[in-house]
Amino acid sequence: MVSDWILLFKMMKNKILNTIGMAAMVLVFLTGCKKLDLIPEDQFTDENYWTSEGKARSVLNTAYSQMANSATFFYNEALSDNAVVGRGDAEGVASISRGTFDPSLVRFKEEWNESYAGIKTTNIFLENVDRVPNMNEDSKSRMKAEARFIRALKHFQLMTWFGDIPLVSQDLTLEEARTISRTPRAEVLSFILSELDAAAADLPANTELSANERGMLTKGAALALKARVLLYEGEWQQVVEVCEMLMNGSNGSYALFPSYADLFHPDNQYSPEDILSLQYVPELRTWGEFFDFAPISVGSRLNAMAPTQELIDSYLMTNGRTIEDEGSGYNEDNPYVNRDPRLTATVVYHLYQWDADGGTPRTIYTRPGTAPDDTGKLDEYSPGSSASPTGYYWRKYYDPEHSSNMASGLNLMLIRYADILLMYAEAKNELGQLDESVWNQTIRPLRERAGFTDAGALTFPSAGQSALREIVRNERRVELALEGLRIFDIRRWRIADEALNGWVHGARFGSPSDDGGYIRVVQRSFDESKHYLWPVPRDERNINKNLSQNPGWN
């Protein structure tokens, strides 16, 4: 797959751009690859483009690039209680989390447009690939399956945010795009699941990929996405069945990577834990969000998003107890000692030992007035400064091999095997079947991999279904922290009224008279009567009068 991405980003000068909306119906096939294209690029038309498998692959590569993007991957975390944007409104997350938005918010329009752009790319591919002469049938079937997977993914993303959406299973004319109506959510869901089944049937297992195909879609990816779709629907028995298809090794080979911290290091990309990743190529296709997440003293320019105290508090003690439990050993004055090792692999806190290159670690000072020099003071909490508004910074996904401005070619995992285990454990519990055997297949290996050794953390707890539900949900939170998934869990569990209302807190660097000294960062607001669905973008409804609106919006 790396070679395909290099071809795409070296040789393609433009990509297929489209959406349902104002800029919707423009198709641009412009490539500058002399190896693949036999006529000048300004002479390509719909009639003469589909002449080789290479050109078809270029269109499919465009669809790959439209699956997701690094900005929403990261900033979606600040839509949840795990992180907060302290300045600006990147990806609209500050407006959304504070409840100060309406259907004109740019994020909604971008989410809508970019998703339908990806859908249009896949539809164009599927409707034209049969025109390629002398194309290998196995290759064609596999490429069609890839396109159908991406089309399903884009519909799933849209449905998750907006509910009812236009189901677009064929390329639309401009007039059709301007008059199409929203399809009932149940019909969209059925389409997504059927597309994933069809894709899984024709995609190879990860064990069948050659070295230069790493990162391409697989049967396992289709099944994993299907499990996630079913999880969001609460179809517990089906979640169990699909997860077992991945856990039993019959549809590929997947396993937990031995080290949680090292899983996110560039040396360990394409590990057995990686089921589906957003692909990047150093120097050619990179992401740079960490330039605004890392401690300033190690080379970032400022802090644009920071972990919250609420996230920190969710990490267990090494004995398996929560910080509120009697006998946990938690010390509020020394709060990062004897905690779940995943905390240190994910979040930077006061006196953190930042080891970027295996050399002498740098101590990070976030408590005001503690740094011994001017460089160290850059990270100290100070209201209104460029430093973190919570007193915490990010560590997970830091790329020690980054180029200037922390630009990284590190792949971003959209689905990993740990999530399969967590989905399985959750579904089993909701069915009343989470017993010691299931625990030892799921939560225990996750904690062992994290570094827990105390029996209190590893042994199946004697608890009822409700208590186990909270244990599994919290395990999901800390295992997947800062990977952009928490907001979707909050929404499907219907706990947003609790998790997304009130003050967001930072470290205990604030006034002792306010919330025990924990920094009050910003107040959030979530209206459960309407915020569980995003409004259909206003610009889209201005163009297309047949698009209805979600409840509570106009």
Image (tube, rainbow, N blue to C red):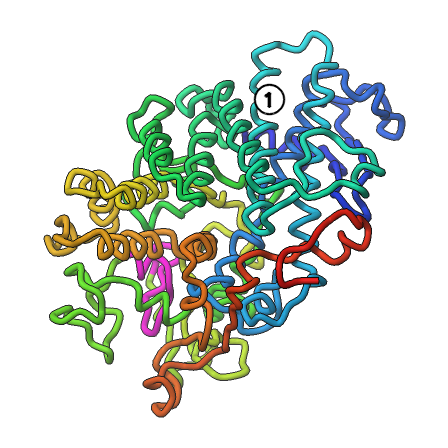
Q: Nearer the viewer, residue 334 or 432?
A: 432
Instruction: Look at 60% across and 22% down and name the residue there.
Output: 143
Q: Residue at x 56, y 23 (%)?
A: 145
Outermost bottom residue: 513
Label 1: which residue?
Answer: 143
- The spot of residue 276 in percent (x, y) is 47, 37
State the image quarter where residue 520 is shown: bottom left
Q: Does 416 sit left or right of 40 as displayed?
A: left
Q: Is residue 376 above or below residue 113?
A: below
Identify the element where label 1 is drawn: helix
> 114 left or right of 373?
right
Magenta segment: does it hold 71? no
Image quadrant assignment for residue 509: bottom left
Q: Residue at x 25, y 42 (%)?
A: 442
- In this view of the protein, which residue sits in the foreground, 203 or 385? 203
Q: Position of residue 542 (x, y in %)?
A: 80, 55
**What is the x, y in percent for residue 392?**
41, 70
The answer to whether residue 307 of the structure is visible from this angle is no
Magenta-drawn segment: 342-359
Find residue 271 and report its horizontal and vertical position in percent.
38, 36
Report the residue at 77% width, 56% height from top: 539
Residue 418, visible in the rendered structure: yes
Looking at the picture, which amino acid does disc 1 mark?
Met
Image position of 410 with respect to 197: above or below: below
